[in-house]
Image: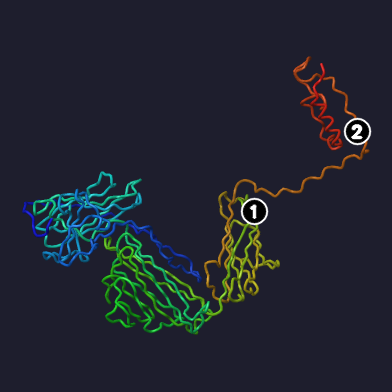
Amino acid sequence: MHPRFGTGSSWRRRPLAVAVAPLALTAALTTTPAADGRALPRDLVCAPPQALVNGGFEEPRIKDADWSILDQSRVPGWATTASDRRIELWAGGLNGIPAAEGRQFAELNANEPASLYQDIATTPGSRLRWRLSHRGRKGVDTMDVLIGPPGGPLRNQGELSDGNTAWGTHTGSYVVPYGQRRTRFAFRAVRTAGGGLSTGNFLDGITFGSPPCLAVDKKVTNLSGHTWAEPGDILRYTVTVRGDGGDRADGVVLDDPLPAVVGYVAGSLAVEGPGASGPLTDAEDDDTGALLDGGRLRVHLGEGATRAAGGTLMPGARATVSFRVRVLPAGRGTLTRNTVTVGYTDRITATRHTSHSTVYTAIGSAADLAVTGTVRPSGPLAPSARAAYAFTVTNKGPAAATHPVVTVALPPGLAGVRVATADGTPCAVEGGRARCPLGTLGVGESARLTVTGTVRPGTPPGTELAVTAAVRADQPDPEPGNDTATVRVTVTARPTPTTPGPTPTRPPRPTTSPTSRPTPSAPSTSTRPGGPGGTGGSGSLAESGTGTLPLALLGAVPVGALLLLLARRRRPRRP
């Protein structure tokens, strides 16, 4: 309704009790082994977001300190059950009422009582959270929050009542039922201080969906043009922070401790995206980024970021931080690891979360050693069966690998273990581990080693016999993820199938003349099965359908004679 008109009415306030259940992040942070054996955070992968859009009614933009009644097609995301399909937006400052967030807000109804709503895609079983700001227009206004399938029924989350002197903030949660892949988030006026339901109940800052989640991606580029970094090269690090969750992330702060083998290039720090304030100095001054003591870069990101605190990244927003470093001579022959951490706050649960991204840079001569493995037999093994594992180490370059050593971890269920290189040189085995030094591997060269043993008697079925081989050399490895290979085989209670041996040789046939033919024996005097004189019996191959020829005789009968006998067998008897 027009902001300057309305009618008065009495009102009654109802208590609101909305339970907020504990919430979990949409993606768990895991760790992965580093090249030196320590655990490092793995880059966070956010679950697909579930969220409504335009929750602050910032689109479309209307004139300052003004109001506008628009067709719902012009207000992204939102719809109404009103017959005229109209939605009313206000700009902050009109009638002295500021927006709760941003610049604009909405009145629940425009010209007639109806529901304002938004339908979003949802995942059955997920717990969604909602948050909104609500305010009365002429006094205390009351509305319902309704959630459910678009076709109904909608479940009432409770009545919200707020006066006209300040915005009230309300939160809640909702578990998506099985099979419900679209969910409606709606509001319905209950009472207004002005009397008419089409007047009052201001709304702003609405969120409904999954928790916030920031995806972080860090990349390094050698600006000197070398394939591998060398002392004196300039490297550019670029960190992209993206809002991939269903809610905004508050207090976004980036921390990046620089490796000791690189030096920061003064004045190279830059930020792009929401809240970016132009070029940054390296000092702790009025801008949002600084180089701290100990070689640590800290940048406050997002809308509203200051020198003292991080700002806000909305779902879908992206911020980029870049800076340059120079490789120091002390870094030659090392594998440099750089991990960036981005912290942020979930405003509904008031909990702090972090995301990470790690990059590796090989400095000086580098050799990418890759390990692959196989086992034979590949199927399950029975106790006392023999197993043979084979591993191949390949140098993918770009430099030769000197003094490569393969360390093999052996399972306790394998007995009589022998580990040897391709030329038969045995490797030292002690305490369930074997150490196999290899010769220098040129680019493209490979070395092979074998692990053999038998399954210990009494090993329970289902036991996994896993052998792991890991390689290291003098040179840094630019791809540490392929330095290790694990091969597994399972123990079974059944005997292990063996490879069939050679076919037994048939004894030689007696020598016969090419023209000689054996004389068939005379028909037996026994009665054929089913014939006169009995119901069963046997006869020669020539007379009986079930008669057999002794196995020893088959080897001595020429093929032609056998064919003759078969022909006589199939010939019908004369009456």
Look at 52% across and 77% down and name the residue there: 228
Look at 60% across and 46% down and name the residue there: 493
Is 166 left or right of 488, judged from the image as shown? left
Q: Position of residue 65 (x, y in %)?
A: 15, 66
Look at 42% across and 76% down and name the residue there: 237
Q: Which amino acid is tagged 2?
A: Arg
Crowd class of label 2 (few under 14; some 14 to 19; many from 20; radius 10 Å): few
Image vertical order of residue 300 relative to residue 484, above or below: below
State the separation of the CA atoms marked 1 and 2: 51 Å
Q: In the image, which disc is placed on residue 377?
A: 1
Q: Position of residue 395 (x, y in %)?
A: 60, 71
The residue nearer to you, when weighing 94 against 389, is 94
Tell me the quadrant of the picture where the N terminus can be found: bottom left
Q: Position of residue 523 (x, y in %)?
A: 86, 23
Q: Quadrant of residue 357?
A: bottom left
Residue annotated with mark 2: 517
Label 1 secondary element:
loop
Q: Quadrant of residue 170?
A: bottom left
